Amino acid sequence: MVLETGKYYHFYNRSNNEESLFKKDQNYIFFLERYRHYLQDSVSTLAYCLMPTHFHFLIKIVTNDCAALKRNIAALLGGYTKAINETCNRHGSLFQPRSKARRVDDEFYLLTLISYIHQNPVRAQLVKRMAEWQYSSYRDLTGLRNGSLPDRQFIMQHFQHLSDFKKYSEEMITTVKKEYWI
């Protein structure tokens, strides 16, 4: 995984064999707490969504020590796996071997990607509306919740009001083609 300071990345990974990554609601919360612990000082998080079998984060690298960031990503995933293994009486790797970090250079695509990330639970038919899924940054970025993980600055630079972002997100759900879904 190649990471560069000041660049944006779509960071994601899946479970092995479509196993559930999050066995209980508290596992989602625990994963986000560990994410904050290991990555918050190294990245700015624009958007995220935790799904039963995978996760998505749209991040901007803010650290100059990308080697340490890679180690922290490994510690996040390894530590989470260890905790799940201990509490669920399982063994082995929970995540696929290599996390992906696709660099995003186009500003329009960044906005599309934020919407795409938030659409995951709707596309998977887990909820009918993006606002119903509590394990994404959608509620935070639309003012429905006051979470502190996502950086709202990027959204506020592109939309005058949170309601404009909400409208954009709802319109985008019909425009992202199926072949782009990960």
Image (cartoon, helix red, strand yellow):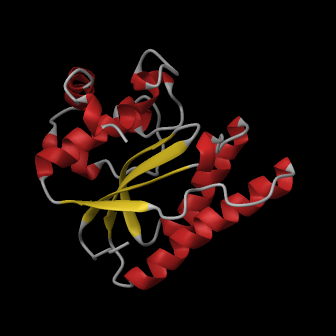
Determine whether 14 is above or below 167 in the image.
below
Could you say which is closer to the camera, residue 123 or residue 5? 123
Residue 48 placement, left or right of 62: right
| Residue at 33 percent of width and 69 percent of height | 61
Which quarter of the figure is the C terminus placed in?
A: top left
In the rendering, at what x and y percent does residue 133 appear?
A: 50, 27
All told, the count of numbered labels is: 0
Could you say which is closer to the camera, residue 3 or residue 114? 3
| Residue at 68 percent of width and 60 percent of height | 93
Residue that protrudes farthest toward the right in the picture = 89
Residue 179 placement, left or right of 90: left
In the rendering, at what x and y percent does residue 127 appear?
A: 49, 19
Asked whether residue 46 appears in the rendered view, the answer is yes
| Residue at 61 percent of width and 45 percent of height | 17
Residue 99 placement, left or right of 179: right
| Residue at 84 percent of width and 57 percent of height | 86
Which quarter of the figure is the N terminus placed in?
A: bottom left
Asked whether residue 157 appears in the rendered view, the answer is no
In the rendering, at what x and y percent does residue 167 appear?
A: 22, 22
Determine whether 162 is above or below 74 in the image.
above
In the rendering, at what x and y percent does residue 31 appear?
A: 62, 52
The quadrant holding residue 102 is bottom left
Residue that protrudes farthest toward the front in the picture = 17
